[in-house]
Image (cartoon, grey):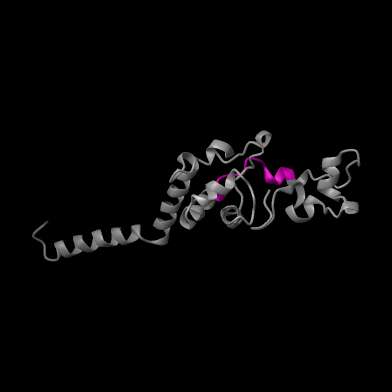
Amino acid sequence: MVNKPGFPHRWACSVLAVGLLALTPVGWAQSANDVGKTIASSGASGVPACASCHGAKGEGMAAAGFPSLAGQGASYLALQLHDFASGDRSNPIMAPIAKGLSAEQIKAVAGYYSKLPAPFDTKTLSRLADTYPQKSAVGAWLASRGDWEHDIPACFQCHGPGAVGVGAHFPA
């Protein structure tokens, strides 16, 4: 076979084509996802792993005040990290972590978490929204009705029924 005319040329073209496929946007996305997964699970450049506080699957630790990241929008997560890094959003834990990440790392880790499944069933939650709670159920009342005497709108007005999140700027 090696002696067939054009064989080395066809072989070289095949190798080049495979190499170029690795450089397509699909290849880049996989690489960014790997970077995001590494930052989430192991940390980067002196920054601790996100999983240390936000859980191995981005499910969060509500009792400790660490929110769920899994399934949130990539642009929302990236904006929060940029705001922590710039000081536009203040948090003594997140500020140094966000400052330790490059813009590419922020984009990668935000993209990684956005692709993870949310730790709750959004369809079920959105159907369970109680629009007429008792006023004594303060949390449910605030979520569905707000507290207009104190200029507090209902959570569901921005975050959707069941507070499962809406679009890129209103997280669950």
Q: Is residue 120 magenta?
A: yes
Query: Residue sitting at 65 percent across and 35 percent down?
Result: 64
Residue 152, horizontal then vertical, whole percent:
83, 53
Residue 121 position (above or below residue 18): above
Q: Quadrant of residue 76?
A: bottom right
The quarter of the rendered structure image containing the N terminus is bottom left
Q: Quadrant of residue 19?
A: bottom left
Q: Residue furthest top?
A: 63
What residue is rendered at 47% in x and 45% in y?
39
Q: Is residue 109 visible?
A: yes
Residue at the image position 85 percent from the left and 50 percent from the top: 146
* Direction from residue 132 to residue 35 in the image, left or right: left
- Extreme left residue here? 3
Can you say whether 98 is above or below 120 in the image?
below
Q: Is residue 7 magenta?
A: no
From this viewpoint, is residue 70 visible? no
Residue situated in front as seen by the camera: 18 or 52: 52
Of residues 74 and 50, the one drawn nearer to the viewer in this rendering: 50
Please, is residue 137 above or below residue 112 in the view?
above
Q: Position of residue 93 (x, y in %)?
A: 59, 43
25 left or right of 170? left
> Could you tell me residue 131's position as x and y percent?
85, 47
User: Residues in magenta?
Assistant: 113-125
Kindly identify the residue that appears in the image at 66 percent across and 57 percent down: 169
Q: Count the marks: how many? A: 0
- Left or right, 94 with respect to 102, comes to right
